[in-house]
Image (cartoon, rainbow, N blue to C red):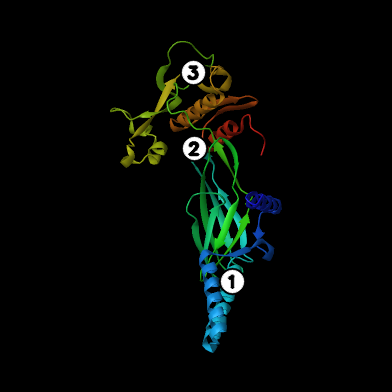
């Protein structure tokens, strides 16, 4: 029973903290009741030293020993107050969180706002239970600072920010004060793109049969530059996105006269015996490839049907549908 007591106490404390964090809104102020403080290992050793000094002063009736003991004890009490005050009444505000692909690092921006006229130093910010090194932050008087924390996005769908732990040992390190915060922040994790996917699914649109005729009638996409291509057909928008140091090269617009095919990314057209996540990953790859090649495409996924389109807004709409497909609503 004695061995099980610490585990039981820890579970009860975690359950109490979870109930308290459920009430966190967009902004949170660390009130007095939310800041906890305990002595560190150095603080316990310092307390033992004070006890030895006190016993020695009593046994030998040392006036200077009493003065030293009570002066050091007063310094420890002052340190405890300043450690607690370094966190108390700090305003916490969630920042931005950008969407990622599953398997990447999801980054959450957290703002620490100091409304007091004193500086706050050496505040460690981390996700509770994380093995990563905490981020240290100083907040100036009546100022603010932004801390970005990362956590792996293990699966697609909505991912809520984990519980945040803030702690400090400033100024002397004899005590450790800490508090928890549940930010109202979430990111959307898109499916991981399939590394090597089949060619883009081109389907006939009923306007003609046979191979398309080369010409300048219909825009058919972007391909690598070939000697003899006209300069007016260079795809400057795509060229600007490519870094020559990373293997980028010139690209040119490709036109077809009377094209008989169009790009349709349809979930129902993929072999149904494949795993669901693989099918979604393949559609994600096709969406990215179509955008990279500047090929207009239609998108069909369950009840989601999007007409032919191209651009950042169209891509985000399709990727969002892939991310939340078959998952519980946020």
- Give the spatial CA distance, label 1 vs label 3: 74 Å
Q: Earlier in the sequence, mark 3 or mark 2?
A: 2
Farthest left residue in view: 227
Cβ–Cβ under 8 Å for marks 3 and 2:
no
- Give the image location of residue 149, x and y in percent: 52, 51
Secondary element under disc 3, as helix, strand or loop, is strand
* Residue at numbered disc 1: 80
- Give the image location of residue 254, x and y in percent: 40, 26
Relative to 185, residue 228 above or below: above
224 or 159, nearer to the observer? 159
Q: Are there few (<14), some (14-19), or many (20+) residues within 10 Å of tag 3?
A: some
Q: How many marks?
A: 3
- Give the spatial CA distance, label 1 vs label 2: 42 Å
Farthest top residue in view: 210
Which residue sits at x=62%, y=55%? Answer: 181
* Residue at numbered disc 2: 103
Q: Nearer the viewer, mark 3 or mark 2?
A: 2
- Give the image location of residue 213, x and y in percent: 41, 16
Answer with left or right where residue 280 lies relative to residue 329. Answer: left
Q: Are there few (<14), some (14-19), or many (20+) residues within 10 Å of tag 1?
A: many
* Residue at numbered disc 3: 261
Which residue sits at x=64%, y=49%? Answer: 4
For residue 249, the mark is: none
Secondary element under disc 2, as helix, strand or loop, is loop
308 or 163, nearer to the observer? 163
Q: Earlier in the sequence, mark 1 or mark 3?
A: 1
Answer with left or right where residue 317 lies relative to residue 33. Answer: left
Q: Quarter holding the C terminus?
A: top right
Secondary element under disc 1, as helix, strand or loop, is helix
């Amino acid at each position: 029973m004695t061995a099980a007591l610490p585990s039981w106490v820890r579970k009860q404390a975690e359950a109490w903290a979870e109930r308290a964090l459920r009430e966190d809104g967009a902004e949170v102020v660390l009130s007095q009741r939310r800041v906890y403080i305990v002595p560190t290992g150095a603080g316990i050793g310092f307390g033992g030293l004070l006890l030895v000094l006190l016993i020695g002063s009593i046994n030998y009736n040392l006036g200077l020993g009493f003065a030293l003991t009570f002066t050091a004890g007063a310094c420890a009490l002052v340190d405890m107050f300043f450690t607690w005050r370094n966190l108390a009444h700090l305003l916490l505000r969630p920042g931005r969180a950008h969407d990622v692909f599953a398997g990447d690092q999801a980054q959450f921006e957290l703002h620490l706002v100091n409304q007091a006229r004193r500086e706050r130093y050496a505040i460690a910010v981390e996700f509770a239970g994380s093995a990563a090194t905490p981020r240290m932050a100083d907040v100036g008087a009546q100022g603010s600072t932004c801390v970005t924390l990362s956590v792996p996005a293990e699966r697609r769908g909505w991912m809520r920010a984990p519980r945040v732990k803030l702690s400090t040992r400033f100024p002397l390190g004899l005590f450790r004060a800490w508090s928890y915060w549940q930010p109202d922040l979430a990111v959307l994790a898109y499916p991981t793109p399939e590394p090597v996917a089949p060619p883009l699914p081109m389907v006939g649109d009923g306007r003609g049969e046979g191979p398309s005729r080369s010409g300048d009638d219909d825009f058919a996409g972007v391909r690598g530059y070939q000697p003899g291509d006209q300069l007016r057909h260079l795809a400057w928008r795509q060229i600007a996105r490519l870094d020559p140091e990373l293997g980028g090269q010139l690209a040119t617009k490709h036109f077809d006269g009377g094209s008989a095919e169009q790009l349709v990314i349809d979930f129902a057209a993929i072999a149904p015996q494949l795993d669901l996540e693989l099918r979604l990953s393949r559609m994600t790859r096709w969406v990215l490839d179509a955008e990279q090649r500047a090929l207009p495409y239609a998108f069909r996924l369950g009840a989601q049907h999007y007409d032919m389109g191209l651009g950042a807004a169209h891509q985000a709409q399709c990727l969002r549908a892939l991310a939340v497909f078959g998952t519980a609503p946020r």
